[in-house]
Image (spheres, rainbow, N blue to C red):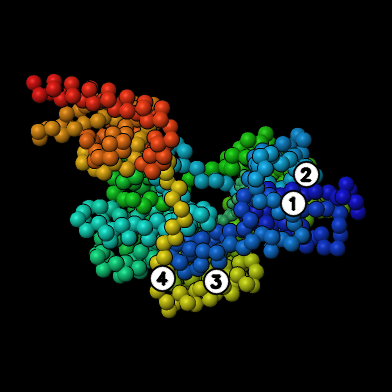
Amino acid sequence: MTEQKRKRVVILGGGFGGVYTALYLEKLLRKHDDFEILLINKENYFVFQPMLAEVVSGSVGILDTVSPIRRMLPRTDLHVREVESIDIKNSTITTTPGFRPHSHVIHYDHLVLALGNVTDFRGLRGLPEHAIPFKNLGDALYLRNHLIHVLEEAAVEQDSPELRRQLLTFVVAGGGFSGVEVVAELNDFVRGVIKNYPQLDPTDVRVVLLHAQARILPELDEKLALYAQKILARRGVEIRLNTKLAAATGDEAILADGTRISTKSLISTVASSPNPLIDALDLPKERGRLKADSSLLVMGTDNVWALGDCALVPMTDGGICPPTAQFAIRQASTAAHNIVSTFRGGERKSFQFKELGKLAVLGHRSAVAQVFGVNVSGFLAWFLWRTIYLMKLPGWGRRLKVAASWTFDLFLPAELVQLKLGDSMGVSHEHFEPGQEVFHQGDLGDRIYIIARGQAEVARQESGREIVLAKLGAGEYFGEMALLNQTTRNATVRCVEALDLLSIHKREFSVLAANLPSMRDSFEQVMKQRRIATASVLAEAAH
Ligand SMILES: Cc1cc2nc3c(=O)[nH]c(=O)nc-3n(C[C@H](O)[C@H](O)[C@H](O)COP(=O)(O)OP(=O)(O)OC[C@H]3O[C@@H](n4cnc5c(N)ncnc54)[C@H](O)[C@@H]3O)c2cc1C
């Protein structure tokens, strides 16, 4: 068959929905050559998310939860690019530029949308700046490194018990499956490795799970959820039910009832939003998910298919499919069959699947499971969890590696290596709540701050009393004096109205100041004016 006559099926997303659709399409393609498959994904690997929490504790290796898509899909053309836009009217996809600064436009005959959803903390005060998400491999790796980092810091901070306790407090928001699995693995890991830090007191470790409802794991039978609660509590996890996270700063998790938990580690598994690409499509949606019919075709279209977390797919009992891998894989089989039926001629299938079960691991060789309607808990559920997920991992090589990791994990201590993957924190966003100090008089100057939103006051301790020197608002900056003069902070800056700051590390600031003389001059001018204003405020206060 000539190139022109071959249909092109373009799949967007290389998660459970996208990769399994391509796998089933490859099987249907077999000896035929009547269509080609092109898959576009940001990464060149597929992530087995159910095992992601185990990366945190190190019971599976970082790369054991991912598989290279090229090996999984030898007959699929893979484009490792970010999708920039989708044009349904002209049946084209545009991807972002790579090394060459031009975008790539790809035509499709059939389009499969499997873009999942995204973590989105927007609108939640301080969470975009300070909460750690947990969705992909990068998040799991970041969290693992962060946990080791705070333990190392706590071991050094001998003269501040308060800071040490803050560093040893870990808060996880969200008591659904991923929140529970993350808190269980985190708790096991931190309590397990703390014996390697003789300077630290294990009783200082505090692990808190916040959940907005009356019990965790609302998807499971109440008995199992209560069992999970009991097991976690016994292992030292403080579970706060009916508790919502309201805001966060770099120093605290702030609860809706006003309680503040002092921590440097806030992990949130709650805020997921539709993928912005799906959001931008002019196609029927409900709660941000694309409305598909039982054949997985997006309503009102004849060549656009949707599945997985970004789709709203009806079940035979009248409900809608939950956003889980279990459903995405089965939907992929139906979608592949129906796509091929449309151009080879044949009956379309309706999606039919009854959930097999639900499982959640609780660490320490225990889990809870509801399989074929039967409740199982403890060691047996844990064994079931490991067996089922091991068999679901793609490829025997990967299965053997994970089985070996799990076996060694039974005898060997947890891995404690912190991977320093380059410091990308030169410019970052920070959020502060009223009353909180951005820095204190006498601190070392390590950053300069630009106010994006809110108000701050600059105050100095003089002869035993505090004098407010200035109030600063959006568009103004502070913290330059200690950096330019290489001294300690000569005043305290405190948040007056919720502050969103852009903070620039002194390393980046020094490079800019050294290479942009006009910028340095303008900073010095402002510094001079501020010195005069300060002298006048202090003189007035002295009278
Ligand atoms: C920590 C965690 C644990 C979980 N555990 C379980 C479990 O035990 N059992 C279960 O059944 N389900 C579980 N789930 C849910 C399950 O992982 C999801 O339901 C499933 O991944 C949905 O598949 P998907 O293909 O729709 O989306 P995803 O798997 O999220 O895949 C979407 C893909 O699209 C790509 N993408 C997004 N935007 C773009 C773009 N602009 N350009 C290019 N590529 C893009 C992403 O990189 C990603 O590869 C878990 C989820 C998480 C986060």
281 is higher (above) or lower (below) than 74: above
Determine which residue is flagged by label 4.
Answer: 414
Task: Tell me the kind of residue under disc 4.
Answer: Ala
Task: Tell me the kind of residue under disc 3.
Answer: Val
N-term mark: 2 or 1: 1
* Disc 2/disc 3 C-alpha distance (Å): 38 Å
SS class of the residue under badge 1?
Answer: strand
SS class of the residue under badge 2?
Answer: loop
* Disc 2/disc 1 C-alpha distance (Å): 9 Å
Mark 1 Cα-neighbour bin, 10 Å: few <14, some 14–19, many ≥20: some
Residue at 73% x, 40% y: name it: 105
194 is higher (above) or lower (below) than 464: below
Contact flag, marks 2 and 1 (Cβ < 8 Å): yes
Mark 2 Cα-neighbour bin, 10 Å: few <14, some 14–19, many ≥20: many
Percent x, y for residue 433?
31, 37
Determine which residue is flagged by label 1.
Answer: 38
In-image side of 242 versus 461 (left or right): right
Contact flag, marks 2 and 3 (Cβ < 8 Å): no
